[in-house]
Image (cartoon, rainbow, N blue to C red):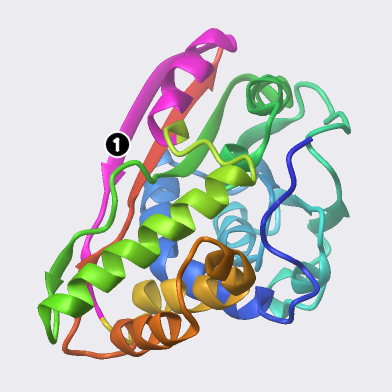
């Protein structure tokens, strides 16, 4: 198995998940709303991270529904007040190797999980198998072959530095097993996994320095600092990169997030 590049013991996971949630929850919540998640549904969240999507699902399914949320590291999930409900179950579960119950859920969702997995196609089949016939799967994944674009920078050198550090981060994460084309490859994988009504759509937006999307780069650069130094970046360059992404005078686009949904046959 490939090794996940982020160290859960580095003390930065909560910050990382907070910026991810602030950046991506509006996209994910909109797709859940349009999918029509209703009271009474039984939902599965694979790789729950900080728990915000599971909490939103719990709001949508109400007291008559239920949510099962899984992750390898469940500390952020078990400590979330929003998940302390009788109809929310938090499970430590490795979707790469441990089976899921068959034909049990009305919806299964994951975000930024499958692209990191070496056996991602087998996992897709396992997740689809956990959904009832006629139920839905929804996967949100970055398409990181499309790099963020600098829209405004304090100086040309800052724009060049941003692109260089982001490219180095991409290389480090790829070396850890990330498939940077997975965002658009999900579609065909779902079509092969016994689903119908497959549909994909992507979204990105502009963000100012200091906002959650730019501070996501900040925390990622800290979590991967040792590897980035091995890629040839200097500590002074990483320091300046963090100043740039925290500066409101800087603006760039987010990564493209592709949401792909399908109905189980």
**Where is 130 relative to 219, above or below?**
above
Name the residue rendered at 53%, 70% in the picture. 220
118 over 218 or under it: above or below? above
Residue visible at 52% across and 17% down in the picture: 189
Q: From what the image shows, is residue 107 above or below residue 234?
A: above
Could you tell me residue 190's position as x and y percent? 52, 19
**Quadrant containing the N terminus in the rendered view:** top right
Q: How far across and how far down the image is residue 87, in percent?
A: 79, 57
Residue 116 makes an appearance in the image: yes
Q: Is 185 inside the magenta-drawn segment?
A: yes
Please tell me which residue lies in front, 121 or 223. 223
Q: Residues within 10 Å of mark 1 (few under 14, many from 20)?
A: some
Residue at mark 1:
201
For the C terminus, the quadrant is top right
**Is 20 colored magenta in this rendering?**
no
Residue 136, position in %: x, y? 54, 29
Quick one: SS at disc 1? Answer: strand
Q: Which residues are magenta?
A: 183-208
Q: Nearer the viewer, residue 167 or 31?
A: 167
Q: Where in the figure is residue 259, as x and y percent of width and height?
A: 40, 40
Left or right for 64, reference 147? right
Relative to 211, 139 lies left or right: right
Q: Is residue 29 at least partly visible in the picture?
A: no
Q: Residue at x 35, y 25 (%)?
A: 199
Image label count? 1
Name the residue nearer the viewer: 146 or 26: 146
- The image quarter containing residue 27 is bottom left
Q: Residue at x 70, y 33 (%)?
A: 105
């Amino acid at each position: 198995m490939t090794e996940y590049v982020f160290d859960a013991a580095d003390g930065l996971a909560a910050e990382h998940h907070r910026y991810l949630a602030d950046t991506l929850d509006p996209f994910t919540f909109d797709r859940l709303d349009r999918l029509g998640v209703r009271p009474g549904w039984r939902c599965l969240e694979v790789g729950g991270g900080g728990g915000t999507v599971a909490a939103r699902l719990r709001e949508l399914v109400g007291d008559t529904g239920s949510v099962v949320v899984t992750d390898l590291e469940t500390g952020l999930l078990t400590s979330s007040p929003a998940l302390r409900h009788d109809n929310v179950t938090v499970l430590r579960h490795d979707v790469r190797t441990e089976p899921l119950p068959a034909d049990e859920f009305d919806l299964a969702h994951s975000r930024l999980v499958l692209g990191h997995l070496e056996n991602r196609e087998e996992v897709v089949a396992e997740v689809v198998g956990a959904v009832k016939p006629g139920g839905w799967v929804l996967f949100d994944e970055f398409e990181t072959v499309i790099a963020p674009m600098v829209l405004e920078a304090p100086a040309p050198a800052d724009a060049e530095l941003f692109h260089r550090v982001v490219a180095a981060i991409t290389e480090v994460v790829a070396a850890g097993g990330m498939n940077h084309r997975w965002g658009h490859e999900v579609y065909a994988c779902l079509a092969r996994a016994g689903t119908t009504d497959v549909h994909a759509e992507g979204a990105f937006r502009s963000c100012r320095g200091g906002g959650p999307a730019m501070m996501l780069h900040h925390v990622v650069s800290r979590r991967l600092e040792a590897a980035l130094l091995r890629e040839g970046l200097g500590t002074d360059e990483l320091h300046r990169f963090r100043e740039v992404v925290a500066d409101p005078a800087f603006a760039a686009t987010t990564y493209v997030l592709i949401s792909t949904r399908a109905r189980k046959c």
